[in-house]
Amino acid sequence: MEMKYKKYLFEMKSVLYDKKWTKTAKNFPVYYVWRSVKEKGDLRYDLTKMPPKMLGKEFPKTQGHDHSLAAPEFITVTKGKALFLHQKCRGKKVDDAYCVPVKKGESVIAPGNYAHFAINPGDKELKFTNWINKKNRNVYNFVKKMSGACYFYTKEGWIKNKNYKRVPELRFEKPLKKAPKDLTFLYGN
């Protein structure tokens, strides 16, 4: 069963870098999600579309989330390009933070024990799909409490979020060029 929803700017105010801009901005959909476009066993296939509309000084992004299960998510860019930011935290301290630049036809695996965020760094629409365990739920509490990810991607580049006590230097990983044939690793432990 397919479910579409829109994530509006005003729902994301707490996780944005440019808080001053949000005070005068009009509300608009930052991104759109279609859940359960198809299903295969206990896996769900979703589609996300993100227009290239800036969020003040910050590039458009998803709100970001952790997972309820320690199960990964497999993501493929189908249009445009993306930056996928991953962070692993212990309380307000970030143990690891890395970014995977992904273009059309490439993929990334979001580890189940990391929060992750999708960013549209371009001037064109971004579309990406994901496979995830249907029992896995998105958890937004920590990201909202910390006012977003440990890094914001802005016109000036990457800026650390000062709400975290410790943030390591951001490292970069390469995307997957081919999708794995067997997705059973998405079931988790």
Image: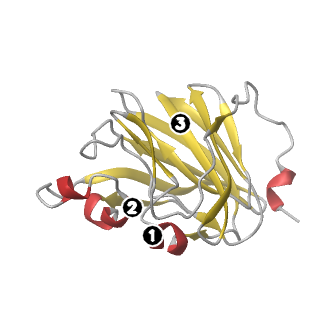
Q: Label 1 belongs to which residue? A: 144
Is mark 1 in CB contact (under 8 Å) with mark 3?
A: no
x%, y% of residue 138?
Answer: 58, 67
Which residue is more in the foreground, 122 or 14? 14
Give the total number of marks visible in the rendering. Answer: 3
Q: Nearer the viewer, residue 181 or 153?
A: 153
**Whole-number angstrom distance, CA of label 3 to CA of label 2:** 17 Å
> Decide: marks 1, 2 in contact (CB < 8 A)?
yes
Query: Label 2 amino acid?
Result: Val
What residue is drawn where x is 43% and y is 35%? Answer: 126
Residue 87: x and y in percent read 63, 54
For the residues labelled 3 and 2, say whether their Cβ atoms are less than 8 Å apart: no
Query: What type is the residue that disc 1 sits on?
Result: Lys
For numbered disc 2, what is the local secondary structure? helix
Q: Which residue is mark 2?
A: 15
Q: Mark 3 is on which residue type? A: Leu
Q: Secondary structure at mark 1?
A: helix
Give the mark, 3 or 2, whose residue is nearer the N terminus: 2
Which quadrant of the figure contains the N terminus? bottom right
Task: Estimate the spatial distance between the alpha carbons at disc 1 and disc 2, rounded to whole Å.
Answer: 6 Å
How crowded is the residue under tag 3: few (<14 C-alpha within 10 Å), some, or many (20+)?
A: many
Tell me which corner region of the image, top left, top right, bottom left or bottom right, holds residue 58.
top left
Of mark 1 and mark 2, the one earlier in the sequence is 2
Which type of secondary structure does the marked residue at label 3 adopt? strand
Indicate which disc, 1 or 3, sits on the residue closer to the N terminus.
3
Q: List the residue tagged with mark 3.
A: 83
